[in-house]
Image: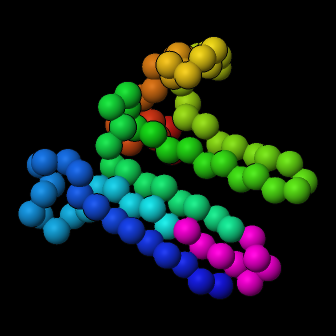
Amino acid sequence: TEGLGRRRTCLDELKGSGVDDTCLVIVKFASGALASIDNSRFAPYGYDARCEVFGRGGQISMNNPSTSAVILQANRQGAVGGVVDESFPQRYAQA
């Protein structure tokens, strides 16, 4: 297993603090399978936590709780859907 990672501070309020807000990791497993992990502390539309796994047997995903289960992605202009909770405490209050 091997990996490569890169990190960066993009948010002005974190620059110089030693805290990175964005990172990318690519992992190659012993089987040859590849995984990519993207992480960012900034999403302008609210707190974002998703996971997607693709493989020969199919795909599984965990998406953000939203005010709507419908997401419209009709063109390359982006997607339109429900409102995503803005913060971690809002998202996981029941936990």
Residue 33 location in percent, x, y? 75, 71
Classified by dominant secondary structure, the portion drawn in magenta counts as loop
* Residue at 11% from the left image edge and 49% from the top image edge: 13
Residue lying furthest right: 57
* Residue at 39% from the left image edge and 61% from the top image edge: 23
Q: Is residue 89 visible?
A: no
Q: For residue 43, which quarter of the picture?
A: top left
Question: Is 61 or 7 nearer to us in this picture?
Answer: 7
Residue 52, magenta (yes or no): no
Residue 55 location in percent, x, y? 81, 56
Residue 21 location in percent, x, y? 29, 56
Q: Which quarter of the rendering shows the N terminus?
A: bottom right
Magenta span of residues: 26-33
Q: Is residue 40 left or right of residue 76?
A: left
* Residue at 49% from the left image edge and 67% from the top image edge: 25
Q: Is residue 3 left or right of residue 53?
A: left
Q: Is 13 rendered above or below residue 67? A: below
Q: How many marks?
A: 0
Scheme by which the image is coloured = rainbow
Q: Is residue 1 left or right of residue 91?
A: right
Q: For residue 88, which quarter of the picture?
A: top left
Q: Is residue 15 visible?
A: yes
Q: For residue 63, which quarter of the picture?
A: top right
Residue 80 location in percent, x, y? 53, 16
* Residue at 88% from the left image edge and 56% from the top image edge: 56
Q: Is 15 rendered above or below residue 29? A: above
Residue 27, magenta (yes or no): yes
Question: Is 13 or 33 nearer to us in this picture?
Answer: 33
